[in-house]
Amino acid sequence: MMHSNCAWSASEVAMTEELAEMLVENVWFCCSAFRVAGHSDYVWLNDATSEDGAQEYAVGRIGPEQSQLTQIESITFSWCTAEKAEQYIRSTRDGHDDNNEWARHVTATIQTAEEHGRCPLCA
């Protein structure tokens, strides 16, 4: 994860297919993060260097405390089809990435939209 001093605003998406489409077809603020309903222990954090660049996402598994995050994957959704993105999201959501050998604990501030408000990245 490149951005360790960012606060992300996490939105919940109803379905895996919806998230895949959103991440492939749109450019999001660098402080955007997403969760799939019913799988709130996983989060996709925008890790792009700018809105003009490739949409890279750090994929994390949240521990017992919201701030305890293990990065388990990194995906460049700009290079994916919606179908491939859905496969990646579903694989993570189903726990297949939990034990990646390169997984590492990271510090992340994940907020609701209300807590986040506006920051320099989304202003």
Image (tube, rainbow, N blue to C red):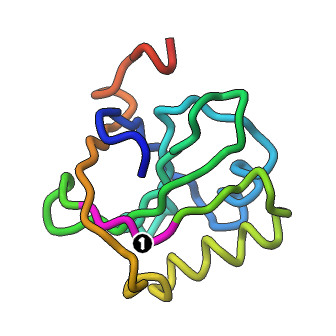
Q: Nearer the viewer, residue 68 or 79?
A: 79
Quadrant in which residue 64 is drawn: bottom left
Q: Which residue is mark 1?
A: 72
Q: Nearer the viewer, residue 80 or 117?
A: 80
Q: Residue at x 34, y 33 (%)?
A: 6
Q: Amino acid at mark 1?
A: Ile
Secondary structure of residue under mark 1 = strand
Q: Residue at x 19, y 52 (%)?
A: 67
What span is colored magenta in the figure?
69-73
- The picture places residue 9, in percent across and down from the top left corner, at 41, 36
Q: Is residue 105 left or right of residue 42?
A: left
Q: Residue at x 33, y 26 (%)?
A: 116
In reply to whether residue 70 is colored magenta, the answer given is yes
Near mark 1 (Cα within 10 A), the count class, few <14, some 14-19 or many ≥20, is: many
- The picture places residue 15, in percent across and down from the top left corner, at 62, 64
Q: Is residue 72 left or right of residue 26?
A: left
> Looking at the picture, does residue 50 appear above or below residue 66?
above
